[in-house]
Amino acid sequence: MTPVRREPLAEQAAAALLDRIRAGEWALGARLPGETTLAPQLGVGRSTIREAVSQLAGRGVLTSRQGAGVFVTALDVTDDWDQVLRRADITAVVEARIAIEVEASSLAATRRTPAELRALRRAVEHRAGRRATVEEHVDADTALHRAIVSAAHNPILTELFDGFTPRSRQAMVELLRIGGAYGSDADQDVHARIVDAIADRDAATAAARTRDHLGTLTARLGTTA
């Protein structure tokens, strides 16, 4: 069996698994082999297999059942309809992020401590250096936004953000894959300017810049339709 060699590995692994499903290797309702079996077959790590399974689960081909394994729920995907569903889900995620993070930015500007401001500056710098993969970039971006929410000193907003993070992460990874570009200097500057407003204790500007930034994510979906 030909191992997966090209980047991005998770997408290649997902495509390889889908090809095997289409070829009839696993029937509808069948249980896939475990990560320790699939990983060496495809020449990737177990974490890559998990990400590939997650991608196919998002496309309705696989489903994970806790304690039971991963099962085939469809033998193929309809790409056009799948893209519509993914864009709708991502739009809903961005709208929820706006509801949480715009208010958090405003509160952070009035409540942040000097230590929290230093943490925000470090998070901005960390984000600037994490552009190698979509997943790495999204994780660094999430860490920055989480630091902003934390600086708001509102435990409900923090709980909402933390509970929402897994779904938000998946949606942001999908969005950047659909768009085909991420981590630009302009995008990095937007985040630095949000932190600058928080540093200046300018609540209105911090909220406005956060809303504008998140609004551009929705706009990107329209340009890739």
Image (spheres, rainbow, N blue to C red):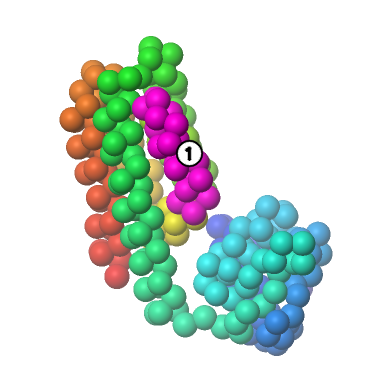
Q: Is residue 132 above or below residue 77?
A: above
Give the prevailing secondary structure in the magenta stretch: helix
Query: Magenta residues, as a range?
Result: 149-168
- x and y percent of residue 215 in the render? 25, 50
Q: Is residue 158 magenta?
A: yes
- x and y percent of residue 149 in the render? 40, 32
- x and y percent of residue 66 in the render? 71, 62
Q: Quadrant of residue 33?
A: bottom right
Q: Is residue 85 magenta?
A: no
Q: Identify the element where label 1 is drawn.
A: helix
54 relative to 203 in the view: left or right: right
Q: Residue furthest top?
A: 114
Tell me what residue is drawn at x 30 percent, y 28 percent: 107
Is residue 175 something that shows in the picture?
yes
The crowd level at tag 1 (other Cα within 10 Å; few <14, some 14-19, many 20+) is few
The one nearer the camera, 183 or 196, is 196
Q: Is residue 45 above or below residue 85?
A: above
Instruction: Tell me the residue that label 1 is attached to.
Output: 159
Tell me what residue is drawn at x 38 percent, y 15 percent: 113
Tell me what residue is drawn at x 19 percent, y 30 percent: 205
Q: Residue furthest right?
A: 37
Name the amino acid type tagged 1. Glu
